[in-house]
Amino acid sequence: MGIANRSQNISQNQDRSAPAHVYGNGNANNRKELGRMVHMKLSLVLTNPDAVAKSPGSDYLRHLVWALLIAIISWGCSTPASNRPASNMTAAREAKKERAELRSNIKKIEPFFKPMGKPQSNDWLETHNEPGQTFEEYLDADPVKPTKERQKIYVLPLGTFSSKQQKIVDQTAEYLDVFYDLPVEKLPARPLVVGPSKNGIQNQRQSKLNRARQVRTGYILDDVLKPILPADAAALIAFTVDDLYPNETLSYVFGQASLENRVGVWSLARMDDNTDDHNFLIRTLKIAAHETGHMFSMRHCKKYECLMSGTNHLQETDRRPIDACPECTAKICWLSEVDQAERYKKLANFSRKNGLPKEADEFTRKANAIARNPEH
Ligand SMILES: [Zn+2]
Ligand SMILES: [Zn+2]
């Protein structure tokens, strides 16, 4: 076909360059902090006895310091040993309970989704042999989770947008907010100024199809986005109206993300191909939520027709739902620690407000299914 596809490019990037801890794992970091604090406390005490011993009338103080030192060392050995298992057990119990709830919710919303069928000609799964990823496999993979320090999704419009495109970016930012239950901040639009070629690699070219400007994704990721990545960003997502290409061998991509650097860029240039405004919005919501999922270690899904399933072309994107399947939703609720029924209610409100009544009703039905008492 000579046509590149977005997902192939992105998933290849993800597999190769995404370390397990792009944003760090809260629990692992906390353990490190605790170790450092205990070590510092002991060092302080160990340096003090000498200083005290040299001062006049120091016997009493020296004994006091050694008594304190012994007490602290004993505390270091005994108190945490008796407390730690209890608190760890509480945390472990909580985590287990939370996962058990998410697992039970998987069953409750299963009826809303179609199992993945046999791929049609030129569909993603016809050309890609992928393992898929269940909730359990996701947890086992030590996924990237937003931390307190890095939990904001920034959305940056790059270039000049029509009022219709502008509105779609605003709606997409709002959708990401409710979909991932993370704060989203829209940055002021800035022009996409393309710098000169470096080491013989051009940063832009003309499309052979319609002579429109195409911008190289690597340039946007490395030279435009990386230098302005805010410190508290879980992800910085740029939208552009320019068409994109990743390298000279491919004719275009819809977008690309660098998971290592927490930046991604997606183009609206082809989202309105052969469709109406309504579907232009739906496609953009699907693609933004799908790619952001990759930034949180979610791989392509092949258990259901799912927002996180790979797509080879826009017709395939159109067949996918606007929502993630039960397994992928469990991942989202785990990473954002959001209440699943509340999340569905917010998604229903968003859909109703943005002219998507069918989707709103479906989200409401899912919220009701989750709220129903589990069978005991
Ligand atoms: Zn993908
Ligand atoms: Zn899925």
Image (cartoon, grey):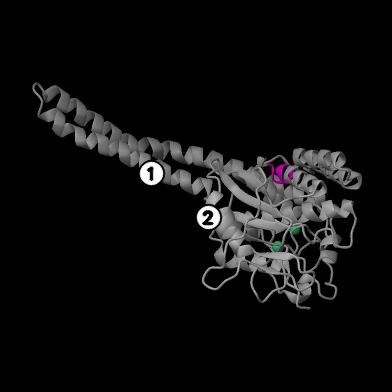
Q: Does the rendering let one see residue 220? A: yes
Instruction: Determine whether the beta carbon of the residue marked 1 sits less than 8 angstroms from the nearest atom of ligand 2.
Output: no
Q: Quadrant of the N terminus?
A: bottom right
Q: Does the rendering let one see residue 325? A: no
| Disc ID at residue 337 | none
Picture layout, residue 361 above or below residue 291: above
Q: Quadrant of the C terminus?
A: top right
Q: Where residue 191 sits in the image (x, y, percent)?
A: 66, 51
- Return the residue nearer the eye: 311 or 209: 209
Q: Nearer the viewer, mark 2 or mark 1?
A: 2
Q: Quadrant of ligand 2?
A: bottom right
Q: Where residue 26 sits in the image (x, y, percent)?
A: 52, 45
**Circle 2 SS class:** loop
Which amino acid type corresponds to the residue marked 1 in the rendered image? Gly
Could you tell which of marks 2 and 1 lies nearer the N-terminus?
2
**Circle 1 SS class:** helix
Q: Disc 1 designates what residue? A: 35
Query: Magenta stretch containing residue 60, yes or no?
Result: no
Mark 1 surroundings within 10 Å by alpha-carbon count, few (fewer than 14), some (14 through 19), many (20 or more): few
CA–CA distance between discs 2 and 1? Answer: 20 Å
Q: Disc 2 designates what residue? A: 21
Q: Which residues are magenta?
A: 176-181
Q: Please name the residue shown 84% across and 54% down the image.
A: 280
Mark 2 surroundings within 10 Å by alpha-carbon count, few (fewer than 14), some (14 through 19), many (20 or more): some
In the displayed structure image, the side of residue 146 where residue 318 appears, left or right: right
For the stretch drawn in magenta, the main secondary structure is: helix
Q: Please name the residue shown 85% across and 73% down the image.
A: 120
| Quadrant in the rendering for residue 318 | bottom right
Q: Where residue 366 sits in the image (x, y, percent)?
A: 83, 45
| Quadrant in the rendering for residue 39 | top left
- Return the residue nearer the eye: 101 or 273: 273
Q: Where residue 68 sits in the image (x, y, percent)?
A: 25, 29
